Amino acid sequence: MRKSLWFTSGRKTSFAGGAVRISIIALACLFLSATGARADTVYTYTGNDFTLVQGPYTTLDSVTGTIVLSAPLPANLSSFTDETALLISYSFSDGVQTLTNLNSHADHFDFQTSPSGAITLWNISFITVPPTNEIESAKVSLGVAHDLGAAGLGAAGQNDGVPGGWTVPEPATLSMMFSGLLGLGMLVGVKRYWGNRLATKT
């Protein structure tokens, strides 16, 4: 019975089989990591501390969160384009509550972007009904911006005029990271193989 390459013994064939297995696994993982990096785009927002507070909110609280889009925001969006169609999920916190796509809905989801696709202006708000709990973030022009969290009547935190910022992972950076990890794994595997071969000889 002819033996499969995956189970062939002997010095040369065993090493060749091991190399083939490592190469196939590495290529598969690289393909999955590359396609995964291109799939969904995650934007992260970090706001500044509230300056006006009421109820359980404090000046140490702020609006932070992430949005997951099916594709990056298009470049050169102007006049606050509604991009709800791209929204897959979100999770935003104001230090007192966390609103997600599972317990609230997007009331506003408008953006303006630069030629490179970076977010320059925005107006987003997530609300629950009932009761009316809300988290907002907006920068509509130079100097006109606010972050707001409201958890029921008489409970609110707000920051006016000091907008936060958005960040988005670069797909190229993610691919390089995965490639580096795969390369390191292959190096360790080869080193372990030859270590075992030498140990067997002695």
Image (cartoon, rainbow, N blue to C red):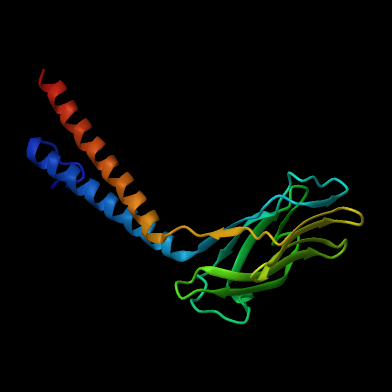
Identify the residue shown where x is 63% and y is 58%. Answer: 164
Q: Is residue 157 above or below residue 200?
A: below
**189 and 128: which is toward the camera:** 128
Nearest to the observer: residue 55 or residue 183:
55
Residue 65 as seen in the image, left or right of residue 22: right
Q: How many marks?
A: 0
* Image-quadrant location for residue 113: bottom right
| Residue 16 point in image, percent of width and height | 13, 44
The image shows residue 129 at horizontal and vertical percentages of: 84, 65
Q: Position of residue 107 (x, y in %)?
A: 74, 71
For the point 56% across and 70% down, which residue is it?
A: 120
The image quadrant of residue 108 is bottom right
Please report the residue visible at 16 percent of the width from the left and 21 percent of the height from the top: 199
Above or below for 180 versus 170: above
User: Which quadrant of the figure contains the C terminus?
Assistant: top left
Image side of residue 172 versus residue 202, left or right: right
